[in-house]
Amino acid sequence: MPAAARHALLTDFAATGRNHPYLTFALNSVCDLDCVFCAPRRMPDYGPKGRPLTVDDYAAIAREAGTWRVRKAHCSGGEPTLRGDILDLLAAIAGGLGPGAAVGMTSHGNLRRGLTVDRLRRAGLTHLNVSLHSLDPRRSAAVMGGGDPARARAAIDVALACGVQVKVNCVLLRSHLRDALRVAALARTLPVAVRLIELQNIGPAGALFPTEFVSEAEVRPYLARWFADAGEVDRTALGVRSPGRYLRPDGWAGSIGFIANTSCATCSDANRIKITPTGLARPCVLRNRDIALKPRLADATLPDAFAHLFRAILERDTNEAWPGVHHVDYDLRWDRVERRRDTPALLPLARAGAAQPCAARAGQPSPGEVR
Protein backbone atom coordinates (compact mmCIF):
# COMPACT_ATOMS: atom_id res chain seq x y z
CA MET A 1 0.00 0.00 0.00
CA PRO A 2 1.40 3.44 -0.90
CA ALA A 3 2.47 5.53 2.07
CA ALA A 4 0.05 8.30 1.05
CA ALA A 5 -2.94 5.93 1.18
CA ARG A 6 -1.88 4.63 4.58
CA HIS A 7 -1.48 8.20 5.84
CA ALA A 8 -4.98 9.10 4.60
CA LEU A 9 -6.53 6.12 6.36
CA LEU A 10 -4.67 6.92 9.58
CA THR A 11 -5.88 10.52 9.33
CA ASP A 12 -9.48 9.32 8.97
CA PHE A 13 -9.07 7.13 12.03
CA ALA A 14 -7.52 9.93 14.09
CA ALA A 15 -10.50 12.13 13.23
CA THR A 16 -12.78 9.75 15.14
CA GLY A 17 -11.01 10.64 18.39
CA ARG A 18 -10.88 7.02 19.47
CA ASN A 19 -7.95 5.11 20.89
CA HIS A 20 -5.51 3.91 18.26
CA PRO A 21 -5.78 0.16 17.52
CA TYR A 22 -3.48 -2.28 19.23
CA LEU A 23 -2.66 -5.94 18.66
CA THR A 24 -3.84 -8.80 20.84
CA PHE A 25 -2.05 -12.05 20.11
CA ALA A 26 -3.40 -15.36 21.36
CA LEU A 27 -0.14 -17.27 21.37
CA ASN A 28 -1.60 -20.71 21.96
CA SER A 29 -4.84 -22.48 22.83
CA VAL A 30 -3.61 -24.74 25.64
CA CYS A 31 -3.41 -24.21 29.38
CA ASP A 32 -2.05 -26.26 32.26
CA LEU A 33 -4.88 -25.08 34.57
CA ASP A 34 -8.64 -25.46 34.16
CA CYS A 35 -10.57 -22.43 35.42
CA VAL A 36 -14.27 -23.16 35.95
CA PHE A 37 -15.43 -20.31 33.70
CA CYS A 38 -13.05 -21.27 30.88
CA ALA A 39 -12.83 -25.07 31.29
CA PRO A 40 -10.47 -25.61 28.35
CA ARG A 41 -9.65 -29.23 29.05
CA ARG A 42 -13.33 -30.15 29.19
CA MET A 43 -13.85 -29.08 25.60
CA PRO A 44 -13.91 -31.95 23.08
CA ASP A 45 -11.59 -30.10 20.69
CA TYR A 46 -9.06 -28.97 23.29
CA GLY A 47 -5.57 -28.38 21.97
CA PRO A 48 -3.79 -26.68 19.09
CA LYS A 49 -5.47 -26.42 15.72
CA GLY A 50 -3.18 -25.94 12.76
CA ARG A 51 0.43 -24.78 12.58
CA PRO A 52 1.04 -21.76 14.83
CA LEU A 53 2.77 -18.57 13.80
CA THR A 54 6.54 -18.60 14.14
CA VAL A 55 8.79 -16.05 15.79
CA ASP A 56 9.66 -14.66 12.36
CA ASP A 57 5.95 -14.34 11.59
CA TYR A 58 5.33 -12.34 14.76
CA ALA A 59 8.29 -10.11 13.98
CA ALA A 60 6.97 -9.37 10.49
CA ILE A 61 3.44 -8.66 11.75
CA ALA A 62 4.77 -6.35 14.46
CA ARG A 63 6.97 -4.49 11.96
CA GLU A 64 4.01 -3.87 9.67
CA ALA A 65 1.85 -2.81 12.62
CA GLY A 66 4.58 -0.37 13.56
CA THR A 67 4.24 1.36 10.20
CA TRP A 68 0.57 1.90 11.12
CA ARG A 69 1.65 3.64 14.35
CA VAL A 70 0.68 0.66 16.51
CA ARG A 71 2.81 0.79 19.63
CA LYS A 72 1.04 -1.71 21.85
CA ALA A 73 0.60 -5.49 21.80
CA HIS A 74 -0.89 -7.82 24.37
CA CYS A 75 -0.31 -11.58 24.49
CA SER A 76 -2.64 -14.19 25.92
CA GLY A 77 -3.60 -17.79 25.36
CA GLY A 78 -4.35 -20.34 26.60
CA GLU A 79 -1.40 -19.84 28.86
CA PRO A 80 1.15 -17.99 26.74
CA THR A 81 4.15 -18.89 28.90
CA LEU A 82 3.79 -22.54 27.88
CA ARG A 83 5.31 -21.71 24.51
CA GLY A 84 8.92 -22.82 24.51
CA ASP A 85 9.88 -19.84 22.34
CA ILE A 86 8.11 -17.24 24.49
CA LEU A 87 11.25 -15.19 25.16
CA ASP A 88 12.19 -14.98 21.48
CA LEU A 89 8.60 -14.25 20.62
CA LEU A 90 8.33 -11.31 23.03
CA ALA A 91 11.61 -9.92 21.74
CA ALA A 92 10.33 -10.21 18.16
CA ILE A 93 7.12 -8.32 18.95
CA ALA A 94 8.88 -5.61 20.96
CA GLY A 95 11.57 -5.18 18.31
CA GLY A 96 9.03 -5.05 15.50
CA LEU A 97 6.87 -2.38 17.12
CA GLY A 98 9.95 -0.31 17.89
CA PRO A 99 11.35 1.71 20.80
CA GLY A 100 8.91 2.61 23.55
CA ALA A 101 6.42 -0.12 22.63
CA ALA A 102 4.16 -1.54 25.34
CA VAL A 103 4.16 -5.33 25.31
CA GLY A 104 1.81 -7.01 27.76
CA MET A 105 0.85 -10.53 28.71
CA THR A 106 -1.95 -12.24 30.63
CA SER A 107 -0.82 -15.25 32.67
CA HIS A 108 -1.89 -17.28 35.68
CA GLY A 109 1.55 -16.52 37.12
CA ASN A 110 2.52 -20.14 37.85
CA LEU A 111 5.49 -20.03 35.50
CA ARG A 112 7.16 -23.21 34.35
CA ARG A 113 10.57 -24.13 35.72
CA GLY A 114 13.36 -22.00 34.33
CA LEU A 115 11.08 -19.16 33.22
CA THR A 116 11.02 -16.02 35.38
CA VAL A 117 9.33 -12.65 35.14
CA ASP A 118 12.77 -11.06 35.07
CA ARG A 119 13.63 -13.02 31.91
CA LEU A 120 10.31 -12.01 30.36
CA ARG A 121 11.09 -8.40 31.20
CA ARG A 122 14.50 -8.57 29.58
CA ALA A 123 12.87 -10.04 26.47
CA GLY A 124 10.60 -7.01 26.14
CA LEU A 125 7.64 -7.45 28.51
CA THR A 126 6.42 -4.15 29.98
CA HIS A 127 2.98 -5.07 31.38
CA LEU A 128 1.78 -8.21 33.15
CA ASN A 129 -1.83 -9.16 33.93
CA VAL A 130 -1.96 -11.92 36.53
CA SER A 131 -5.13 -13.99 36.95
CA LEU A 132 -5.75 -14.40 40.68
CA HIS A 133 -9.16 -15.34 42.08
CA SER A 134 -8.37 -16.28 45.67
CA LEU A 135 -5.40 -16.01 48.00
CA ASP A 136 -6.31 -19.28 49.71
CA PRO A 137 -4.59 -22.27 48.02
CA ARG A 138 -7.52 -24.65 48.38
CA ARG A 139 -10.16 -22.18 47.25
CA SER A 140 -7.96 -20.92 44.44
CA ALA A 141 -7.50 -24.46 43.15
CA ALA A 142 -11.28 -24.94 43.24
CA VAL A 143 -11.67 -22.03 40.81
CA MET A 144 -8.57 -22.50 38.67
CA GLY A 145 -8.30 -26.28 38.61
CA GLY A 146 -4.83 -26.21 40.15
CA GLY A 147 -1.97 -23.82 40.56
CA ASP A 148 -0.77 -21.99 43.64
CA PRO A 149 -1.71 -18.38 44.44
CA ALA A 150 1.57 -18.00 46.36
CA ARG A 151 3.48 -18.53 43.10
CA ALA A 152 1.28 -15.96 41.37
CA ARG A 153 1.91 -13.51 44.22
CA ALA A 154 5.64 -14.11 43.92
CA ALA A 155 5.44 -13.38 40.18
CA ILE A 156 3.69 -10.09 40.97
CA ASP A 157 6.39 -9.11 43.44
CA VAL A 158 9.18 -9.88 40.97
CA ALA A 159 7.37 -7.98 38.21
CA LEU A 160 7.03 -4.89 40.36
CA ALA A 161 10.65 -5.13 41.46
CA CYS A 162 11.93 -5.17 37.88
CA GLY A 163 9.71 -2.35 36.63
CA VAL A 164 6.88 -4.26 34.97
CA GLN A 165 3.46 -2.64 35.34
CA VAL A 166 1.00 -5.09 36.94
CA LYS A 167 -2.73 -5.61 36.78
CA VAL A 168 -4.51 -8.35 38.72
CA ASN A 169 -7.52 -9.96 37.02
CA CYS A 170 -10.10 -11.40 39.42
CA VAL A 171 -13.38 -12.85 38.13
CA LEU A 172 -16.32 -12.25 40.45
CA LEU A 173 -18.09 -15.44 41.54
CA ARG A 174 -20.85 -15.43 44.14
CA SER A 175 -19.41 -18.42 45.98
CA HIS A 176 -16.00 -16.72 46.09
CA LEU A 177 -17.00 -13.09 46.62
CA ARG A 178 -15.04 -12.69 49.85
CA ASP A 179 -12.03 -14.16 48.08
CA ALA A 180 -12.32 -11.50 45.38
CA LEU A 181 -12.54 -8.72 47.97
CA ARG A 182 -9.39 -9.99 49.66
CA VAL A 183 -7.64 -10.02 46.29
CA ALA A 184 -8.80 -6.42 45.78
CA ALA A 185 -7.23 -5.50 49.10
CA LEU A 186 -3.79 -6.28 47.63
CA ALA A 187 -3.93 -2.79 46.15
CA ARG A 188 -3.70 -1.37 49.66
CA THR A 189 0.05 -2.03 49.78
CA LEU A 190 0.98 -2.97 46.21
CA PRO A 191 1.10 -0.53 43.26
CA VAL A 192 -1.16 -2.73 41.13
CA ALA A 193 -4.50 -2.21 39.39
CA VAL A 194 -6.90 -4.91 40.60
CA ARG A 195 -9.66 -5.51 38.07
CA LEU A 196 -12.86 -7.12 39.35
CA ILE A 197 -14.38 -8.76 36.29
CA GLU A 198 -18.01 -9.72 35.88
CA LEU A 199 -18.75 -13.28 34.78
CA GLN A 200 -20.09 -13.42 31.23
CA ASN A 201 -22.88 -15.72 30.13
CA ILE A 202 -20.87 -17.30 27.35
CA GLY A 203 -19.17 -20.61 26.70
CA PRO A 204 -18.58 -22.89 29.72
CA ALA A 205 -19.39 -20.00 32.07
CA GLY A 206 -23.02 -20.24 30.93
CA ALA A 207 -23.58 -23.18 33.26
CA LEU A 208 -22.33 -21.10 36.21
CA PHE A 209 -24.06 -17.86 35.31
CA PRO A 210 -27.48 -18.35 36.98
CA THR A 211 -25.97 -19.00 40.41
CA GLU A 212 -22.52 -17.37 40.28
CA PHE A 213 -23.02 -14.04 38.48
CA VAL A 214 -22.36 -10.97 40.65
CA SER A 215 -22.76 -7.50 39.17
CA GLU A 216 -20.61 -4.46 39.79
CA ALA A 217 -23.64 -2.77 41.39
CA GLU A 218 -23.89 -5.55 43.96
CA VAL A 219 -20.19 -5.51 44.81
CA ARG A 220 -19.64 -1.77 45.09
CA PRO A 221 -21.44 -1.38 48.44
CA TYR A 222 -18.93 -3.75 50.00
CA LEU A 223 -16.21 -1.34 48.92
CA ALA A 224 -18.01 1.88 49.85
CA ARG A 225 -15.80 2.49 52.88
CA TRP A 226 -12.69 2.15 50.73
CA PHE A 227 -14.07 4.35 47.98
CA ALA A 228 -15.38 7.13 50.21
CA ASP A 229 -12.26 9.26 49.74
CA ALA A 230 -10.93 7.56 46.62
CA GLY A 231 -9.53 9.51 43.71
CA GLU A 232 -9.88 8.44 40.10
CA VAL A 233 -6.78 7.07 38.40
CA ASP A 234 -6.05 8.07 34.81
CA ARG A 235 -6.55 5.01 32.64
CA THR A 236 -3.82 6.05 30.22
CA ALA A 237 -1.31 6.03 33.06
CA LEU A 238 -2.43 2.50 33.91
CA GLY A 239 -2.12 1.33 30.31
CA VAL A 240 -5.83 0.50 30.37
CA ARG A 241 -8.05 0.76 27.30
CA SER A 242 -11.18 -1.02 28.56
CA PRO A 243 -14.21 0.93 29.85
CA GLY A 244 -14.62 1.59 33.54
CA ARG A 245 -13.24 3.77 36.29
CA TYR A 246 -10.21 2.95 38.41
CA LEU A 247 -10.24 4.36 41.92
CA ARG A 248 -7.39 4.67 44.40
CA PRO A 249 -8.54 4.82 48.03
CA ASP A 250 -6.78 7.42 50.13
CA GLY A 251 -3.37 6.17 51.23
CA TRP A 252 -3.40 3.08 49.01
CA ALA A 253 -0.52 2.15 46.73
CA GLY A 254 -2.74 0.73 43.98
CA SER A 255 -6.22 1.01 42.52
CA ILE A 256 -9.39 -1.01 42.00
CA GLY A 257 -11.47 -1.06 38.85
CA PHE A 258 -14.38 -3.02 37.43
CA ILE A 259 -14.75 -4.74 34.08
CA ALA A 260 -18.56 -4.82 33.87
CA ASN A 261 -18.87 -6.55 30.51
CA THR A 262 -22.33 -7.87 31.34
CA SER A 263 -24.21 -5.27 33.41
CA CYS A 264 -22.66 -2.08 32.00
CA ALA A 265 -21.42 -3.34 28.69
CA THR A 266 -20.30 -1.20 25.78
CA CYS A 267 -17.90 -1.55 22.90
CA SER A 268 -18.00 2.09 21.90
CA ASP A 269 -14.22 2.36 22.03
CA ALA A 270 -13.14 -1.17 21.17
CA ASN A 271 -9.85 -1.04 19.32
CA ARG A 272 -8.30 -4.48 19.45
CA ILE A 273 -7.02 -6.28 16.39
CA LYS A 274 -7.10 -9.92 17.44
CA ILE A 275 -4.70 -12.42 15.91
CA THR A 276 -5.14 -16.12 16.57
CA PRO A 277 -2.33 -18.64 17.13
CA THR A 278 -2.53 -19.81 13.51
CA GLY A 279 -2.56 -16.28 12.10
CA LEU A 280 -6.19 -15.30 11.56
CA ALA A 281 -6.61 -11.57 12.06
CA ARG A 282 -9.90 -10.28 13.39
CA PRO A 283 -10.85 -6.61 13.80
CA CYS A 284 -13.94 -5.80 15.88
CA VAL A 285 -16.37 -8.57 16.81
CA LEU A 286 -19.30 -6.99 14.98
CA ARG A 287 -18.30 -6.32 11.39
CA ASN A 288 -15.66 -8.90 10.98
CA ARG A 289 -13.90 -10.58 8.08
CA ASP A 290 -11.24 -13.03 9.11
CA ILE A 291 -7.98 -12.44 7.28
CA ALA A 292 -5.51 -15.30 7.03
CA LEU A 293 -2.16 -13.59 7.54
CA LYS A 294 0.09 -16.48 6.57
CA PRO A 295 -0.61 -16.10 2.83
CA ARG A 296 -0.14 -12.34 3.25
CA LEU A 297 3.22 -12.96 4.85
CA ALA A 298 4.18 -15.28 2.01
CA ASP A 299 3.20 -12.93 -0.83
CA ALA A 300 4.18 -9.64 0.85
CA THR A 301 0.62 -8.25 0.94
CA LEU A 302 0.53 -7.67 4.68
CA PRO A 303 0.03 -3.89 4.19
CA ASP A 304 -3.26 -4.60 2.38
CA ALA A 305 -4.39 -6.76 5.29
CA PHE A 306 -3.73 -3.98 7.78
CA ALA A 307 -5.57 -1.51 5.55
CA HIS A 308 -8.62 -3.75 5.76
CA LEU A 309 -8.29 -4.10 9.52
CA PHE A 310 -8.25 -0.34 10.02
CA ARG A 311 -11.17 0.14 7.65
CA ALA A 312 -13.18 -2.52 9.49
CA ILE A 313 -12.80 -0.66 12.77
CA LEU A 314 -13.72 2.63 11.09
CA GLU A 315 -16.83 1.14 9.46
CA ARG A 316 -18.11 -0.04 12.82
CA ASP A 317 -19.40 3.52 13.36
CA THR A 318 -21.93 3.02 10.55
CA ASN A 319 -22.74 -0.61 11.32
CA GLU A 320 -26.51 -0.83 11.77
CA ALA A 321 -26.13 -4.14 13.62
CA TRP A 322 -24.64 -2.33 16.61
CA PRO A 323 -27.49 -1.19 18.92
CA GLY A 324 -25.26 0.40 21.51
CA VAL A 325 -24.56 -2.61 23.72
CA HIS A 326 -21.63 -4.96 23.85
CA HIS A 327 -21.66 -8.17 21.87
CA VAL A 328 -19.19 -11.01 22.20
CA ASP A 329 -18.47 -13.67 19.61
CA TYR A 330 -18.42 -17.20 20.94
CA ASP A 331 -15.03 -17.90 19.44
CA LEU A 332 -13.18 -17.15 22.65
CA ARG A 333 -11.02 -20.19 21.96
CA TRP A 334 -9.63 -18.43 18.92
CA ASP A 335 -8.87 -21.15 16.39
CA ARG A 336 -11.45 -23.71 17.41
CA VAL A 337 -14.49 -22.37 15.60
CA GLU A 338 -14.50 -22.11 11.84
CA ARG A 339 -15.64 -18.67 10.73
CA ARG A 340 -16.22 -16.97 7.43
CA ARG A 341 -13.07 -15.67 5.85
CA ASP A 342 -12.65 -12.84 3.35
CA THR A 343 -16.40 -12.31 3.02
CA PRO A 344 -18.30 -9.11 3.76
CA ALA A 345 -21.09 -10.78 5.73
CA LEU A 346 -21.69 -9.88 9.34
CA LEU A 347 -20.89 -12.60 11.81
CA PRO A 348 -23.62 -14.02 14.04
CA LEU A 349 -23.80 -11.97 17.21
CA ALA A 350 -24.20 -13.22 20.75
CA ARG A 351 -25.48 -10.77 23.29
CA ALA A 352 -23.35 -10.85 26.41
CA GLY A 353 -26.27 -10.00 28.68
CA ALA A 354 -29.02 -7.48 29.03
CA ALA A 355 -27.56 -4.02 29.21
CA GLN A 356 -28.70 -2.17 32.30
CA PRO A 357 -28.20 1.41 33.46
CA CYS A 358 -24.77 1.79 34.99
CA ALA A 359 -25.98 3.35 38.20
CA ALA A 360 -23.40 1.29 40.05
CA ARG A 361 -20.91 4.13 39.70
CA ALA A 362 -22.57 6.02 42.53
CA GLY A 363 -21.71 5.20 46.12
CA GLN A 364 -24.21 3.13 48.10
CA PRO A 365 -24.54 2.26 51.80
CA SER A 366 -22.27 -0.62 52.71
CA PRO A 367 -23.98 -3.80 53.97
CA GLY A 368 -20.75 -4.91 55.58
CA GLU A 369 -17.10 -4.17 55.94
CA VAL A 370 -14.21 -5.85 54.25
CA ARG A 371 -11.19 -6.38 56.41
Image: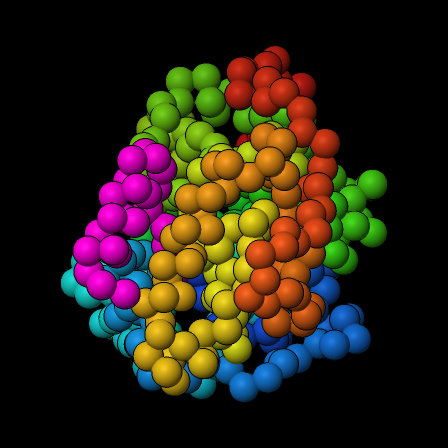
Identity of the residue drawn at 50% across and 68% down: 291
Identity of the residue drawn at 38% across and 43% down: 240
Location of residue 237 (image quadrant): top left
Name the residue nearer the viewer: 36 or 341.
Answer: 341
Identity of the residue drawn at 35% across and 74% down: 301
Whether 66 is drawn above or below 53: the answer is above
Its colouring scheme is rainbow
For the C terminus, the quadrant is: top right
Q: Which residues are magenta?
A: 1-23
Q: Residue furthest left?
A: 99
Q: Is residue 347 visible?
A: yes
Drawn side of residue 68 relative to residue 371, left or right: left
Q: Position of residue 4 (x, y in %)?
A: 19, 56
Drawn side of residue 188 relative to residue 12, left or right: right
Identity of the residue drawn at 79% across and 75% down: 44
Q: Per the image, is 9 magenta? A: yes
Drawn side of residue 184 relative to residue 139, left or right: left
Location of residue 246 (image quadrant): top left
For the N terminus, the quadrant is: bottom left
Name the residue nearer the viewer: 360 or 183.
Answer: 360
Q: Position of residue 162 (x, y in %)?
A: 25, 62
